[in-house]
Amino acid sequence: MDLKLVGKRALVTGSSSGLGEAIVKMLAAEGASVVVHGRNEARAKKVREDIIAAGGKADIAIGELTTDEGADAVVKAALKNGQIDILVNNAGATSHKSWGDATTGDWSDMYNNNVVSYVRMIQRIVPQMKTLGWGRVVHIGGGLGIQPIKEQPHYNATLAARHNLSISLARQLKETGITSNVVSPGAIINPMVEDWLVSAAPKFGWGTDLEEIKYKAVQELIPNDTGRFGEPEEIAGAVAYLCSQYADYVSGATIRVDGGTIKCM
């Protein structure tokens, strides 16, 4: 299926590894010219090289989004070779601290990383989208913003804020040709998660086989309708759809890609 992204240019924040890498590679495979962003230049260059080797077009933008100066530098680099049609706000931080451990400083840092940094990119990229008369802003949210757990409250709250600001932005962008939507992932498997599962398996009695460990972890920690973890490419697919012209009529929406983990309307 042609998502009609040829000729579009996309900036994906936090795309030098992990979920962002899967997103930026899928957008490139669909024909978009992409900007790989990260704080580690070597990793960003490697992703760019992978994209180019696969026949895609890619630039890089290196910088920290937690300061205005850093965001300015990233946007300057991103716009160097053309305007941005698509902004995917993905970069952020996570924390497993509990209510008793997370200080007010931790809350402030998490909010700056996960919410204010999104705002910085919106304020710098969306105005030039308006001159194009078309654009896509996709925010990566999360199920913990809808159904928070007792742990990591400061992280949960930032996900809720991302969902909220995305809808507010969609209302602000009424009839501009620019849409703002959220993709809300469930538990996604990656090498870091696999390492944690293997190390935690003895404590929970999950056995030693990785596939068995993953299945039992899902049943006990994140029960869902599919009985498994999600894959980064499954999140990337939802993002790619929202970036396409087939999503012109989708505004202020949250697409949950979580295997049915979140049980709500």
Image: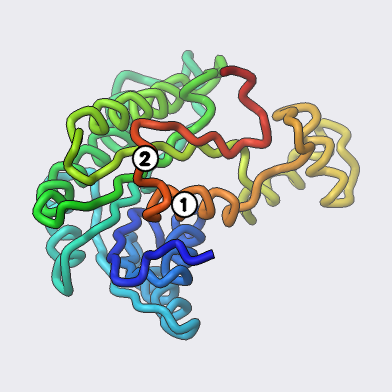
Q: In the depicted view, which residue is nearer to us: 215 or 70?
A: 215
126 sits to left or right of 28? left
Question: In the picture shown, does residue 57 fall above or below 19?
Answer: below
Task: Tell me which amino acid carries mark 2.
Answer: Tyr
247 sits to left or right of 265? left
Q: Quadrant of the C terminus?
A: top right
30 sits to left or right of 186? left
Q: Residue at x 46, y 40 (%)?
A: 183
Q: What colouring method underlies this structural image?
A: rainbow
Q: Which residue is mark 2?
A: 249
Q: Residue at x 26, y 64 (%)?
A: 62
**Residue 196: horizontal and vertical position, in percent?**
68, 44
Q: In the depicted view, which residue is nearer to us: 213 or 181?
A: 181
Q: Residue at x 70, y 29 (%)?
A: 222
Q: Quadrant of residue 252?
A: top left
147 sits to left or right of 211? left
Q: Secondary structure at mark 2?
A: loop
Q: Quadrant of residue 20?
A: bottom left
Measure how far apart labels 2 and 1 are at the Cα level: 12 Å
Task: Tell me which amino acid carries mark 1.
Answer: Tyr
Q: In the depicted view, which residue is nearer to us: 240 or 123?
A: 240
**Residue 68: horizontal and vertical position, in percent?**
12, 45
Q: Quadrant of the N terminus?
A: bottom right
Find out whether the residues at labels 2 and 1 contact each other: C-beta distance under 8 Å: no
Q: Nearer the viewer, mark 2 or mark 1?
A: 2
**Residue 130: horizontal and vertical position, in percent?**
12, 49
Q: Which mark is residue 70?
A: none
Q: Which residue is mark 1?
A: 241
Q: Residue at x 77, y 35 (%)?
A: 217
**Residue 82: horizontal and vertical position, in percent?**
16, 70
Q: Secondary structure at mark 1?
A: helix
